[in-house]
């Protein structure tokens, strides 16, 4: 349950089938350890922009987000002011939500502050990896949040990050490969 065999003969998590963007994301990115600081910051932003929307919407707009947010370079985004906010609110290539735009800027500033203190987002996020990897048998077993994601959200908020509750934190843990929630039998599981 929860697996679909694609035209290529590979069994994959059912959410990662159908649309070619989902297939590529599932096969090549989701659940694979992401240890690039700027890319991880970008992924965090995309995770909270996705709140309330489908991930496919975000995947389709991902190039627009990268262009609009200067490749998610935290030191650049941290300097955004009113003119950049107005530009982003007019950009149909992204999700135009003022609270989420403000959070992206605040989070870039928090990340720059972390860097000034000698911390990295990569080290912080991966410090919440669970002790052992579980293998899930169905989509119903995939949690929305965990004690680790709750602790990560608390740590991020303590550093000034916004829009990063336990559910967003867990989605980041999944997408960045802190946990591998590919279902048992998925060709990517444990890769």
Image (cartoon, rainbow, N blue to C red):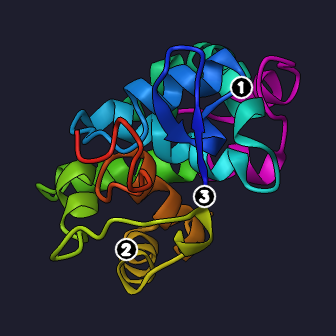
Quarter of the picture containing the C terminus is top left
Report the residue at 50% width, 37% height from top: 12
Query: Label 3, on which residue?
Result: 1
Report the residue at 49% width, 52% height from top: 107
Q: Position of residue 100 (x, y in %)?
A: 72, 50
- Left or right: residue 35 versus residue 52 is left
Query: Label 2, on which residue?
Result: 152
Q: Position of residue 151 (x, y in %)?
A: 37, 83
Q: Work out whether residue 3 or residue 112 is closer to the camera in this orientation and state it.
A: 3
- Start-end of magenta stretch: 78-104
Q: Are marks 2 and 1 in contact (CB under 8 Å)?
A: no
Which numbered disc, 3 or 1, marks the residue closer to the eye? 3
Badge 3 or badge 1: first in the primary sequence: 3
Q: Position of residue 168 (x, y in %)?
A: 57, 62
Q: Work out whether residue 124 or residue 179 is closer to the camera in this orientation and state it.
A: 179
Quarter of the picture containing the N terminus is bottom right
């Amino acid at each position: 349950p929860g697996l679909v065999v694609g035209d290529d003969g590979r069994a994959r998590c059912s959410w990662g089938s159908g649309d070619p963007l989902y297939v590529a994301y599932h096969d090549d990115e989701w659940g694979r350890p992401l240890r690039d600081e700027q890319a991880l910051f970008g992924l965090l932003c995309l995770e909270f922009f996705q709140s309330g929307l489908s991930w496919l919407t975000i995947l389709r707009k991902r190039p627009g987000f990268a262009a609009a947010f200067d490749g998610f370079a935290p030191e650049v985004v941290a300097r955004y002011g009113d003119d950049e906010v107005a530009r982003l609110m007019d950009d149909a290539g992204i999700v135009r939500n003022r609270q989420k735009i403000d959070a992206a800027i605040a989070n870039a500033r928090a990340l720059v502050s972390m860097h000034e203190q000698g911390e990295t987002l990569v080290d912080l996020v991966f410090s919440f990896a669970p002790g052992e990897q579980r293998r899930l048998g169905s989509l119903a077993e995939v949690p929305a949040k965990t004690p680790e994601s709750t602790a990560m959200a608390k740590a991020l908020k303590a550093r000034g990050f916004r829009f990063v509750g336990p559910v967003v934190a867990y989605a980041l843990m999944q997408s960045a490969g802190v946990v591998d929630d590919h279902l048992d039998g998925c060709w990517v599981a444990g890769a």
